[in-house]
Image: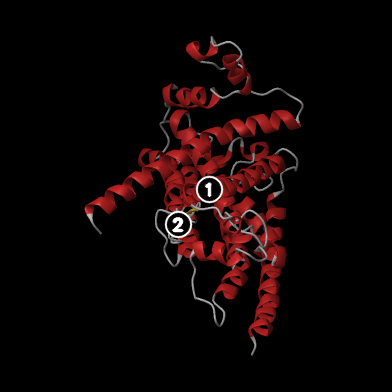
């Protein structure tokens, strides 16, 4: 690889990570706005900047919208007193929030967000690195996120954080099995006779262009994967690692200031990546409609990049809203209910779904 390619990749990586972090901060604002809307409240509408706030109409509108609230939240976490209790294991206590965030920032490297069609018809995929085993890479790296939670619970030397970390590890083991099995029919179809064998997410999107989206003819895979994503991101009703009513605040009870904020950023980063993966695997990625692609409208050049990225981001934001809607609608499960759902319902269902589509794909591909 030439020096110019390395520089371009580095710049692109910096842009992708910056956009992801920006999405995380405004996802927190969206969460607060969605919860206030569901509960009949107003939400953040006071934080402002002196100069912008004085602009007639525009400044007041942005203030009421809460657009400056993420900056205030970030500065608050940054400048609050950072308390490290005397009884904790300091090295691992400090390392845990970092381990919680790094997997999300790493998996974004293989997530495609759109494409650029040149005038001669060639396609440049907008992805940091398009590897042939992208889905395996995502599963392998994203699984490491639970180590940050477990390490935080163990390093706190406190019973409630420790129980939260143990719950997180048990939940991850329970639901990753079903999640991994649920996507196998998608890649069985991609690797069938007469089709190029691949585990690339770009090829998954291309396979849905001009035809049915996988969510339409593999609905059970889609539903199982969706439930497992909730569990993998520790979102309600699966937030067993926190569970305030039982564990005070769970694994991050002893944390404060910036390290506490890193756990939240990591959670929302995993939500964003998870939403993108759902859209890519089952909802056509950057294709606007089933049986239609942007190429059918004659879209090329920079317009193809803008529309493809905008389409995927629109689906991503829709799933983020769904994450938030569920959190403020459904009550938390009991721990035994979470384990029963994972082992006695979703795992057998995912295996049955795999057998079903193995048979279906066999007869479709049979000569």
- Total marks drawn? 2
Q: Tag 1, which secondary structure?
A: helix
Look at 40% across and 53% down and name the residue there.
128
Q: CA distance from mark 1 to mark 2?
A: 11 Å
Question: Is 332 drawn above or below residue 109 in the view shown?
Answer: above
Q: Residue at x 45, y 22 (%)?
A: 80
Q: Which mark is residue 337?
A: none
Residue 52 x/y as whole percent: 51, 14
In the rendered image, which residue does mark 1 sit on? Answer: 309
Q: Which mark, residue 125?
A: 2
Q: Which secondary structure, mark 2? A: strand
Mark sitting earlier along the chain (1/2): 2
Residue 94, position in %: x, y? 39, 38
Residue 3 place in picture, x, y as percent: 22, 52
Visible residue check, residue 88: yes
Residue depicted at 56% across the width and 17% down the height: 47
Quadrant of the frame with the C terminus: bottom right
> Is 61 on the left-hand or right-hand side of 24?
right
237 and 153: which one is in front? Answer: 237
Left or right, 347 with respect to 168, comes to right
For image coordinates 66% across by 41% down, the residue present is 321
Extreme residue in the left direction: 3
Judge whether 70 appears above or below 251 on screen: above
Q: Residues within 10 Å of mark 1 (few under 14, many from 20)?
A: many
């Amino acid at each position: 690889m030439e020096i110019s390619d390395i520089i371009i990749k580095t710049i692109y990586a910096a842009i992708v990570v910056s956009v992801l972090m920006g999405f995380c901060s405004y996802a927190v604002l969206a969460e607060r706005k969605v919860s206030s809307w569901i509960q009949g409240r107003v939400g953040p509408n006071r934080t402002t900047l002196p100069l912008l706030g004085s602009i007639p109409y525009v400044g007041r509108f942005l203030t009421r919208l809460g657009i400056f609230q993420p900056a205030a939240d970030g500065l608050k976490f940054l400048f609050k007193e950072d308390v490290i209790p005397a009884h904790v294991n300091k090295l691992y206590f400090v390392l845990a929030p970092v381990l919680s965030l790094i997997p999300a920032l790493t998996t974004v490297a293989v997530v495609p967000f759109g494409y650029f069609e040149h005038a001669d018809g060639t396609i440049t995929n907008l992805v940091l690195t398009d590897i042939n085993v992208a889905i395996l890479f995502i599963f392998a790296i994203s699984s490491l996120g639970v180590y940050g939670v477990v390490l935080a619970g163990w390093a706190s030397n406190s019973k409630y954080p420790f129980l939260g970390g143990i719950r997180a590890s048990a939940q991850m083991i329970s639901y990753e099995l079903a999640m991994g099995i649920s996507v196998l029919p998608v890649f069985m179809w991609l690797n069938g006779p007469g089709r190029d064998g691949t585990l690339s997410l770009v090829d998954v999107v291309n396979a849905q262009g001009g035809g049915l989206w996988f969510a339409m003819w593999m609905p059970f895979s889609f539903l199982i994967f969706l439930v497992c994503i909730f569990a993998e991101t520790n979102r309600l009703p699966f937030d067993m690692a926190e569970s305030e009513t039982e564990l005070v605040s769970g694994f991050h009870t002893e944390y404060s200031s910036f390290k506490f904020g890193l756990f939240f950023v990591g959670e929302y980063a995993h939500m964003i990546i998870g939403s993108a993966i759902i859209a890519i695997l089952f909802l056509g990625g950057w294709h606007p409609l089933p049986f239609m692609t942007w190429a059918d409208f004659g879209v090329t050049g920079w317009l193809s990049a803008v529309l493809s990225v905008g389409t995927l981001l629109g689906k991503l934001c829709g799933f983020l809203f769904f994450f938030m809607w569920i959190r403020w609608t459904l009550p938390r499960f009991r721990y035994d209910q979470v384990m029963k759902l994972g082992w006695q319902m979703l795992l057998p269902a995912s295996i049955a779904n795999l057998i079903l589509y193995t048979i279906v794909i066999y007869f479709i591909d049979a000569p």
